Amino acid sequence: MEILTKALAEIPRAQQDLREFVRARALVRQLGRDRVCDALRSALRPWSGTFEVSAWDSGRGHFSTFGGTPSRPNPYVRRWCVSPSELRDRLQRNAQRVRAKGTGLCLTHARVAATGGSTDEEVIERTALFCDADVRGEPDGLVDALRRAGAAFVLSRKVRDSSFHAVIPYAAPLATIPGPAFKQTYRVRMGVLLGLFSEMGELACEWVGVGSPKLLGFDIATARRLGTLEYAYNKREPNDALPLFEANEGLALDPHAWLEALGWTAEPEPLRARREPAVFYDGPTQPNTWLPALESAGMLLQRRATGGRFCVCPLEHEHTEGPRNPTATFVSSAGVLWCSRGGGHLRGRYREARAAMPSHVQHFFTENQR
Ligand SMILES: [Zn+2]
């Protein structure tokens, strides 16, 4: 427990997914693996038996997973609707070939848009949890727990250095919603799931500071992207040992039900814990209604060092400068909404910006809102 306690003391509150990962490992130790396994069993569901995986195999590895556009879709994507054993067989066939680093098969366990890339914006739904252990021990503990619970999975393992991948299908695909609020919730959930499976699999756990989160168990960095990539194991050299593959045609995981069965509650979000009325009002006659409205709409981003909060621009559709810049738009601590895009396109247009906000937050605004 000492390592986990030390890690929790050092991980900043802002790295909520990593904190939840550590708390999940601690929870398994506290409840015992048997109880966590019982809860897992109660969260497994009958399912179609197949799940969609997006695969890119151009002989150029991850360089073929680039994002597409409607006019120039990524031509390399292949959509596989597979059972666990079908995926195992494909991975096994792929592994026979000798392929140098970066030139092999890439997968994401998700359904992607018609544009065919693996960027977060193109991921429509996640179909399975991907667990990636890089020299954290053998997979036997995890395989045993999954088999005992009756869960479907596909396991790939390297022989030489005990690295392995586990893919655990979801009972219902996890629909993704573009935007920072969803991503934050998603990452926190993934932190919990990977923490639970790391401890159930009795993976090695080390703590050398926030720079090496993957030493805590399954690599949490793989869960920070919606279109996270699995680089399929293969023979790098002709005399390399063949990786080993295993599949189980079991039930599929309802991740929400598992967390509920465990009585999981996340730590309160840091910004809520530190919320003070002073942040919201700059005087009795001028309530700062943008902050609560944007928060309620899930549009607030990180704090500004100089006060206030960055946020999503209510008129973001007008931006012509390319992808969203998380520091282009903010509300000052005095309650003024400012967007630097388009030379400050919100100036004098707050009425329009308010009207573009979701209807359920309209009650926050007052007539003299800036
Ligand atoms: Zn804007």
Image: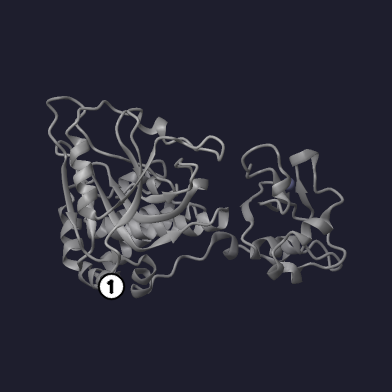
- Looking at the figure, which quarter contains the C terminus? bottom right
Q: Is residue 163 visible?
A: no
Kindly state the secondary structure of the residue where label 1 is placed.
helix
Which scheme is used to colour this image of the protein? one colour
Q: Is residue 101 left or right of residue 278?
A: left
Which of the pair 258/72 is nearer the observer? Answer: 72
How far from the left and from the top, in percent, is residue 67? 49, 38
Tag count in the figure?
A: 1
Circle 1 residues within 10 Å: few <14, some 14–19, many ≥20: some
Depth check, front residue: 35 or 115: 115
As drawn, 358 above or below 115: below
- Residue 198 in percent (x, y) is at 27, 55
The residue indicated by pointer 1 is 39
Looking at the rendered structure, the kind of residue marked 1 is Ala
Mark yes or no: residue 356 visible. yes
User: 275 or 40: nearer the eye?
Assistant: 40
Q: Residue at x 32, y 51 (%)?
A: 130
Q: Quadrant of residue 2?
A: bottom left
What residue sits 50% from the left and 42% below the top? 115
